[in-house]
Image (spheres, rainbow, N blue to C red):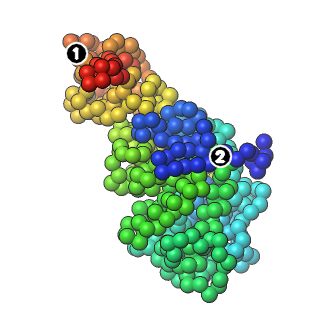
Amino acid sequence: MNVQAMVCIAACLALNGIGRGTTGIRPSPSRRYVTYRGRTTMLIGDSGTQVVPMNGGLDLSAWLETCRREGHSTVHVWAFTGAKPGDWRLGSREPLLPWARMPDGTYDLQRFDDGKDPKRHYWARIRDLCAQARKRGLLVGITVFFGWAKEHGPSPGWPHHPFNVSMGGFATRSADIVQLADPKEIGGEQWNSQWPPRRKAQWLWERFAMKLIGETRPFDNVWFDYRDEWSYLNPEAARAEAFWRRFFTSRGAIWADRTGEGGLRVENPGVPAFGPTPAIKTEGPPYEHEEVRGEVWRQAMSGIHYLLHNDAREPNVASWDPGIARSRGISPSNDLGRRYVGICSRFFNRQVRDLDSLAPSPGIAKGSCRCMAGKADIVALVPAGEAEIVLDVRDYEPVERVRILNPKTGSLTNVKPRRSGATLIVPIGREAQDTVVHVSARRKPLLDHRRGAVAL
């Protein structure tokens, strides 16, 4: 089916997180996870940052298919950044941005980069990304604002940002494009070249946001998150955060920010794992492959959804551009960090039997391991070198199966535990890396004396 002809999903996201239509994204009943296509899902996946939307030579199909095959539940991108010359990750072509590029390399901010070829036009690429991901059952997160134009400190994206006067824009300071000029929407007004820079910026951002919402509206697998690189941490930024949350959610978009008032929460930094909506780590270190393996499991075992910030070491997401892969001698098949993230996602989303009930339960496991438990599962992350783990299973009967997952290879092995009264002793074998123990068992019904009913 032609993407442009897809039926629009009815959109209505209230502040309690209701998603687009019956198959859209929304918080799960427990508010710890999300529901998509009727299935409870933990968002764990690869983030292509600005590289995926801006590098037209990057093979979208191959990237998405590999993420699907490896078990990722979502992918993620940044809408765009200022196109810094010499950034090899963006490939040999002119980088794709939302606005029309002029022959002299500047941008016409009154025209969007519309076209049909997703390798040559920004908005066609955004549509293609969402459509191909949806076909594979993958969700897509998009970070919006402000193109890496930070309001304080070094601003790597600002010198080549489309709003910069040197690129055909109107602003001389990055601060003028990240703050609001008016608490009310102004995108419906007629453009006025005499406006001060902040009003021009707000008008352009509103038009960009409307375009982004409209282009992704046919797809029920898209969510948005606010802020890049934790750059906007003052009262003015908080007002902007509330403004854009209302702007997106009132138009049916699935929205994540640092508050609990959207459909999801960005965890970077300091947002507790559990609250009114699910929390997500969308970016940031560590980046090295082996460190990523530890990080994704630490986050997931704390109830935090996780996205791999995959543009900071090699091979990274840019290796899906064949020209880059050849010139730098790298291959996406050697991206172990991405593979480790897929193993973690596949476990939680395909092996755990009752994901929505799963929550951190430190009292079940003895020792220094992390533990989660739910109605049908106990999951423990055991530190390297441990010979066994002791679990308190007094509330579970029967214990049906015990398996060990190698988070480095993804292999699952059945093991025979020892039972000693209310405890289950699972042999580990002093592995060289952390090990995951998965116990399939049914939690006993508990009698709620106040209501005279059985609570599961």
How packed is label 2: few (under 14 Cα within 10 Å), some, or many (20 or more)?
some
Vertical comparison of 37 with 364: above or below: below
**Residue 259 appears left or right of 13:** left
Camera-near label (2 vs 1) is 2
Q: Amino acid at mark 1?
A: Ala
Left or right: residue 349 versus residue 189 is left
* Residue of label 1: 422
The image position of residue 35, as x and y in percent, is 52, 37
Say whether disc 2 or disc 1 marks the residue closer to the N-terminus: 2
State the residue position of label 2: 10
Q: Residue at x 51, y 53 (%)?
A: 255
* Farthest bottom residue in view: 194
As measured in the structure, the alpha-carbon distance from the residue carrying label 2 to the one carrying label 1 is 51 Å
Percent x, y for residue 244? 51, 63
Q: Quick one: which residue is furthest to the front in this view?
A: 451
Answer yes or no: is residue 235 visible: yes
Q: Residue at x 60, y 37 (%)?
A: 22
Looking at the image, is 371 positioned above or below residue 453?
below
Residue at 25% from the left image edge and 21% from the top image edge: 449
Mark number for residue 340? Answer: none
Amino acid marked by disc 2: Ala
Q: Secondary structure at mark 2?
A: loop
- 381 or 135, which lies in front? 135
| Left or right of 453, for residue 124 | right
The residue drawn where x is 38% and y is 13% is 400
Q: Quadrant of the C terminus?
A: top left
Mark 1 nearby-residue class (10 Å; few <14, some 14–19, many ≥20): few
**Residue in front for this viewpoint, 120 or 432:** 120
Residue 270 image offset from top left, x and y in percent: 33, 54
Position of residue 77 measured from the top left corner of the image (x, y, whole percent): 56, 54
